[in-house]
Image (spheres, rainbow, N blue to C red):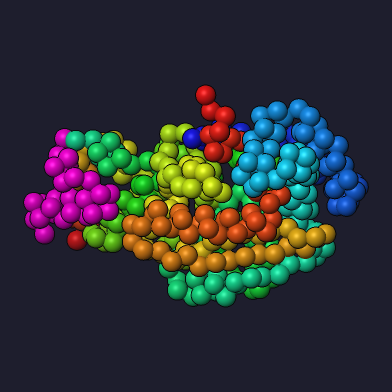
């Protein structure tokens, strides 16, 4: 899966799961604010990522995670590391 | 609408006092000591009295005298439930009797091997469920998600005096460690339990009609349950007469992303419990925001 395809898939499930307008999802937008995540919503994020990409996020992955670009990079690195 | 301020009415000192009473005086005499404590609460906890009187008088429609009397009885009942919890945890389990209503629902949930979400409330005595479930030879681990530091202090104290427990606590923290604890628990076929009737300021909430007036409920439990597609059961452990308990387990029908529907089902279920056990709903704050300026 190429990066663009991965980003598209990530955006799709974020729009679907968190019911946000797709136009709000921009690489430099803040993930937490845009998706309106509170402390329990991250459970959904972790489980959904695992279901869609087969990779497990861990606590350390969230350190420094701020924008959508960070999130895309994180998933990409996780998927690559798994392969 | 009002959120809980995060402070329990019984602190660690209160627990220590009752542990002393139970160990030295026994359960039933400890119950009688409660009259003194309940009277103090009734006299001095003005805000809690006002909120609880509102619950009985305005929401449940009790007469002023009956509502006032029930405020006192509510404190007394809460104290009995705490004493039972401490006594059972300290190894006096065999002195209590119990019955199940809907235990097959929990069995079916565990057999799916998908983990499960239990949604309970600050009603009755959910935390003793583990002792009754263990009698049925269920190898089940329950993780209770809590949010406040005060509960943690009380839990740490109770852990020191209690037998090892099948319930562990997941504390919601800024570092998001709870996220992984919850997802790991579900992945390991454990049960994750939320209380669905108390929200803290600053977290997502859903507004719905409860006992005839709109109130705010925490969004988290219902959002997670409706998104993750894991089985959901409403569970309550209610105190009956003397040293008898009744565990209720009701399966919730969950549709993807229908968190408001799930909340409605929860409220309907909770209202049934309140109608049956009005003295066992322990939310001593301005739940409906009736006194908010």
Q: How many marks?
A: 0
State the residue lying farthest toward the top.
B293
Confirm whether the magenta stretch covers residue A23.
yes
The stretch in magenta equals A1-28
Q: Position of residue B240 (x, y in %)?
A: 76, 60
Residue A8 lies in the magenta stretch: yes
- Left or right, A40 with respect to B135, comes to left
The one nearer the camera, B86 or B267, is: B267
The residue lying at 78 percent from left, 40 percent from top is: B65
Residue B282 occupies which quadrant of the picture?
top right
Residue toward you, A51 or B40 = B40
The residue at 17%/42% (across/down) is A25
Q: B6 above or below B246?
A: above
Q: Within the image, what quadrant is residue A29 found in? A: top left
Residue A43: where, in percent of width, then height? 38, 51
Q: Is residue B199 visible?
A: yes
| Residue name at image x 85 percent, y 41 percent | B35
The residue positioned 64% from the left and 70% from the top of the image is B101
Position of residue B9 measured from the top left corner of the image (x, y, whole percent): 68, 35
With B224 as the anchor, is B26 left or right in this view? right
Instruction: Measuring from the top left, give residue B229's x and y in whole percent.
Output: 37, 63
């Amino acid at each position: 899966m190429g990066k663009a395809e991965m980003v598209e898939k990530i955006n799709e499930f974020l729009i679907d799961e968190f019911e946000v307008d797709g136009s709000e999802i921009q690489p430099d937008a803040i993930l937490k604010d845009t998706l309106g995540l509170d402390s329990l919503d991250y459970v959904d994020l972790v489980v959904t990522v695992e279901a869609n990409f087969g990779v497990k996020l861990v606590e350390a992955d969230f350190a420094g995670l701020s924008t959508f670009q960070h999130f895309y990079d994180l998933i990409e690195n996780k998927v690559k590391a798994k392969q | 609408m009002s959120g809980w301020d995060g402070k329990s009415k019984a602190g660690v000192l209160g627990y220590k006092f009752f542990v002393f009473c139970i160990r030295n005086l026994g359960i039933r005499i400890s119950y009688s000591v409660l009259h003194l404590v309940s009277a103090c609460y009734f006299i001095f906890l003005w805000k809690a009295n006002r909120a609880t009187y509102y619950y009985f008088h305005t929401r449940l429609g009790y007469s002023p005298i009956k509502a006032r009397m029930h405020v006192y009885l509510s404190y007394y009942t809460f104290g009995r439930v705490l004493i039972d919890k401490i006594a059972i945890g300290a190894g006096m389990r065999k002195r209590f009797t119990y019955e199940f209503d809907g235990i097959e629902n929990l069995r079916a949930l565990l057999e799916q091997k998908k983990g499960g979400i239990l949604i309970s409330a600050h009603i009755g005595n959910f935390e003793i469920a583990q002792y009754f479930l263990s009698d049925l030879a269920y190898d089940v681990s329950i993780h209770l998600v809590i949010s406040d530091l005060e509960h943690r202090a009380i839990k740490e104290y109770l852990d020191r005096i209690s037998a090892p427990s099948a319930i562990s606590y997941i504390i919601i923290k800024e570092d998001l460690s709870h996220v992984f604890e919850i997802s790991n628990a579900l992945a390991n076929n454990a049960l994750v339990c939320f209380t669905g009737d108390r929200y803290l300021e600053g977290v997502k909430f859903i507004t719905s009609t409860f006992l005839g007036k709109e109130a705010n409920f925490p969004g988290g439990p219902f959002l997670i349950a409706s998104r993750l597609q894991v089985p959901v059961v409403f569970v309550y452990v209610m105190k009956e007469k003397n040293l008898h308990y009744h565990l209720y387990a009701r399966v919730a029908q969950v549709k993807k992303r229908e968190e408001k529907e799930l909340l409605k089902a929860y409220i309907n279920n909770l209202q049934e419990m309140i109608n049956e056990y009005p003295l066992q709903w322990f939310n001593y704050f301005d739940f409906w925001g009736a006194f908010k300026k």
